[in-house]
Image (spheres, rainbow, N blue to C red):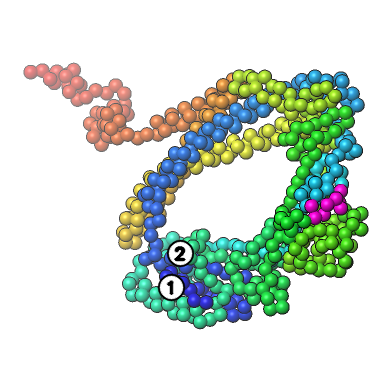
Amino acid sequence: MMADASFPLQMIPESSREGLADGVGAYTEYNDQGGYYPEQRKDNGGFSGACCTMCIGLLVFPLALVVLGWNEQTSVCANNMIMLAEDNAETGACDDTASVEGKFSFISCPIAVDNATLLTPKVSFNLPGLGDSISFASIAGAQRVEMYQCIESKSSTTKSSADAEKAGESVLQRTGVRTRTSESTLQKEQERRESDKEQADHGKSDLVRRNDKPEEKGSKQTYQYRMEWSDVHYKSEEYKDTPENIVNSGCPDFIYRGIVNHNPSPPDRGDGSPVEIGRQKVTATSVVAGGYTLSEEKELHKLTAEELVSLKPFSDKFSLRSGVDQVISSINTNTVGVHEQTPHFLSSCRSDHLGCIRISYSKSDATHMSVLALTEGAGILKPQPVDSSWGCAASSFIRMFPEEMSKDDMIAKLKDEQHASTWIFRIAGLIAAMCGLYCCFQPVAHAADVMGDVLSYIPIFGQLMENVLEGIVDTALLLISCSFGLSCGLLVIATVWLAMRPMVGGPLLLAVLVLMAIGYYAASTATRDPKRMRKDKQAFAQQQPWQQQGEQGAGEQPPWQQQGEQGYGEQ
């Protein structure tokens, strides 16, 4: 296959040519736009790129500080509500709702299965072709529709330095040493690339194709193929490799009787519309546990549906003959059935073939429900109102876990969740603050890089001087960014805690200020200013002998003072 002549071709390393002749293996796509030669290396971005990075840093740094402040404020308010529940919530009996009526309460009771919602494909999961052929009662349920397909996966890798050397690379990536390539050498390399282009065009190169817009310069994309059940539909018409190679690479059903067999479209669901490939979950509008009823939608969404429902009891409602393998155009009781090998699936095929459909159902395995909420009349559980406080607006509190636990266990679990969430945002905010400051200093790093490029032209020691300069500047900028970013982040955290909880924020803020004072004192005392040195005292070499002796023996006087005392200065 001829390559696009409008783009310069890279040499294909010998290690990458292996496997082209046998016609079997993963499809590999090379990027021809990533130059390995000095004439192709350009300053992508330069000073403008550094300025853009600085602008990003100017946005990220204050945003990180805002997130840190918001996180600490949210954490304090959430902890206030948890402490309110710990101190004031009363434990209610499962068979006596009147004892906690109108009070902030904690209950942990078994779920009444008799009051669970009856789930069916037609009503609950919008699959009219199956009607009410399957039904099960649960507080939460899910339907998963899958298709057996040929799936393409991609992995991107950059070319190694060994491949670059075989391609005639003149930049030694491992050592970082830059060399200048003469015009004659570049001409030879160009001739070698043209020769390699002719070999690739005339050889068996169906597995090697070139992309006009690769994701990354100097990289290659490897495509692999496999047959697998998936709840996502893949359009095989857009696959990169040839059908013959796809068959040899892991999808034997991709060609059937000499005809390309693409992944079929999703079948009809029974009313003229295609079925939704994937997983659908539904939850009950209310759950009864003991004498209490929970109807809060946000809390009910926490219910999971992971226990597979056995479909064997419903097998007599489907008329599909056992042993039939077919690609169906519509889902109904005549096109799918329950096979002995897979009792948890409705399937259109006995064995796995491209285009087969299978449907499974799952339900919640929860047997108990633990809730912290306000108990109203008839055991109705509602959010507990929480009055506003310093730094926290008025809100409400209700929490549910689909398991049996004590009040202390639930409080401990809430504290652990809040603690984990707070630290995730706290660490992310501090890292973002440091990275934002580092981005702000990119123009300085770019200036050091430009100066390093100038120093690299000095014979023998130029490259070493460039590496030392750039290394020192990068290290200094990194240290400055980390220290100042961390200090600013901790200062924001301490300020929020000081405003909302002075007993905690006061010592924290004091510790931050002490650290900043120590750093300032260390920096000021470590300064060696030549002007201050000349102002305070003369250099030792410029001092008179009596001054040098005066430092060694206190009380000695200059010669004219000593002679004046003996009459030396009399006229």
**x and y percentages locating residue 367 in the rendered image:** 86, 39
- Could you classify mark 1 by the number of other residues whose Cα lies within 10 Å: few (under 14), some (14-19), or many (20 or more)? few
In the image, 566 versus 343, the foreground residue is 343
Residue 129 falls inside the magenta stretch: yes
Residue 250 in sight from this viewpoint: no
Q: Is residue 405 above or below residue 238?
A: above
Q: Is residue 97 above or below residue 431?
A: above
Q: Is residue 479 left or right of residue 262?
A: left
- Could you classify mark 2 by the number of other residues whose Cα lies within 10 Å: few (under 14), some (14-19), or many (20 or more)? some
Name which residue type carries label 1. Ala
Residue 384 in sight from this viewpoint: yes
**x and y percentages locating residue 111 in the rendered image:** 87, 36
**Image point (35%, 35%), residue name:** 528
Q: Which residue is mark 1?
A: 5
| Magenta range | 128-135
Q: Which residue, as the protein is rendered here, is positioned at the far left?
A: 571
Residue 410 falls inside the magenta stretch: no
Q: How much space separates mark 2 and mark 1, taking CA atoms?
A: 16 Å
Q: Which residue, as the protein is rendered here, is positioned at the far bottom?
A: 202
**Image point (76%, 66%), residue name:** 327
| Most common SS among magenta residues | loop
In the image, 36 versus 166, the foreground residue is 36
**x and y percentages locating residue 392 in the rendered image:** 62, 23
The numbered disc on residue 34 is 2
Name which residue type carries label 2. Gly
Classify mark 2: helix, strand or loop. Answer: loop
Q: Is residue 464 left or right of residue 174?
A: left
**Image point (36%, 49%), residue name:** 47
